[in-house]
Amino acid sequence: NAGVTQTPKFQVLKTGQSMTLQCAQDMNHNSMYWYRQDPGMGLRLIYYSASEGTTDKGEVPNGYNVSRLNKREFSLRLESAAPSQTSVYFCALKPGRNNEQFFGPGTRLTVL
Amino acid sequence: GQQLNQNPQSMFIQEGEDVSMNCTSSSIFNTWLWYKQDPGEGPVLLIALYKAGELTSNGRLTAQFGITRKDSFLNISASIPSDVGIYFCAGRGMNRDDKIIFGKGTRLHILP
């Protein structure tokens, strides 16, 4: 998966619980992204980070926070999970100036 | 905001047939990307297009960047069982702050 690892692969939460999804790269790229994928909805951008220490909101940021403390890792946090956040979450990298993005294997999250 | 319309949503074909799918956008794009997603996996980049009119092949796959800059096409020739999956188009607008957006996908089924 293009040098991108995501943990965990699966997670079940109860409403109101918190958790952090981890994404790590071994490619030393600046740009990293978090997407969610829902049936029939394609991929929607939650947050992105153009470089270490910077983050910006995407299309659907509500209910999420992110952290890019170093170049290698970009984490996504759900402070108080809701059933509407049941989804598959993908982390992606953009290696250079072109627009190609490469995806990790995903985290499948269910919120009960 | 920008929108991508991907057609068809689902296709059922016989093994060996050629396949064609397309995406149209509400605005002009400077990049078109085509991805394939297998069940339980992250999307994998198939073809990237950067110039209007560009025609690029990757094995049995051929994609084109439409002349109007508002559409793109993906063709698969002589389909085989491993072509089953969801195909996503993605594109980016001309403005500096535009982000990559994704179509909702075309699910390809191959009948025995």
Image: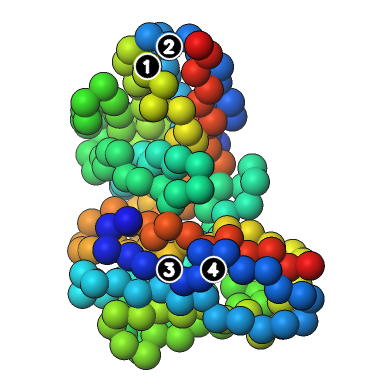
Crowd tier of the residue under label 1, counting other residues whose Cα lies within 10 Å: few below 14, some 14–19, many 20 or above = some
Q: Which residue is mark 1?
A: B79
Measuring 56% from the left and 41% from the top, which residue is drawn there?
A: B104
Does residue A13 sit above or below B4 in this rendering?
Answer: below
Q: Which residue is mark 3?
A: A6
Measuring 32% from the left and 56% from the top, which residue is drawn there?
A: A1
Co-location on one chain, circles 3 and 2 = no
Q: Give the CA distance from mark 1 to mark 4.
A: 34 Å
Does the rendering let one see residue A49? no
Crowd tier of the residue under label 4, counting other residues whose Cα lies within 10 Å: few below 14, some 14–19, many 20 or above = many
Crowd tier of the residue under label 2, counting other residues whose Cα lies within 10 Å: few below 14, some 14–19, many 20 or above = some
Which quadrant of the figure has residue A91? bottom left
Does residue A57 sit above or below A54 in this rendering?
Answer: above
Q: Give the CA distance from mark 3 to mark 1.
A: 32 Å
Chain letter, disc 3 residue: A
Chain letter, disc 2 residue: B
SS state under label 3: strand
SS state under label 4: strand
The kind of residue tagged 3 is Gln
Q: Which mark is residue B68?
A: none
Q: Which residue is mark 4?
A: A46
The kind of residue tagged 4 is Ile
Kindly indicate whether the residue at mark 3 contacts the one at mark 4 (C-beta within 8 angstroms): no
Does residue B49 sit above or below B14 in this rendering?
Answer: below
SS state under label 2: loop
Kindly indicate whether the residue at mark 2 contacts the one at mark 4 (C-beta within 8 angstroms): no
| Residue A41 pos. (x, y %) | 62, 47
Chain letter, disc 1 residue: B
Q: Give the CA distance from mark 4 to mark 3.
A: 16 Å
SS state under label 1: loop
Position of the N terminus of chain B, as image quadrant, is bottom right
Kindly indicate whether the residue at mark 2 contacts the one at mark 1 (C-beta within 8 angstroms): yes
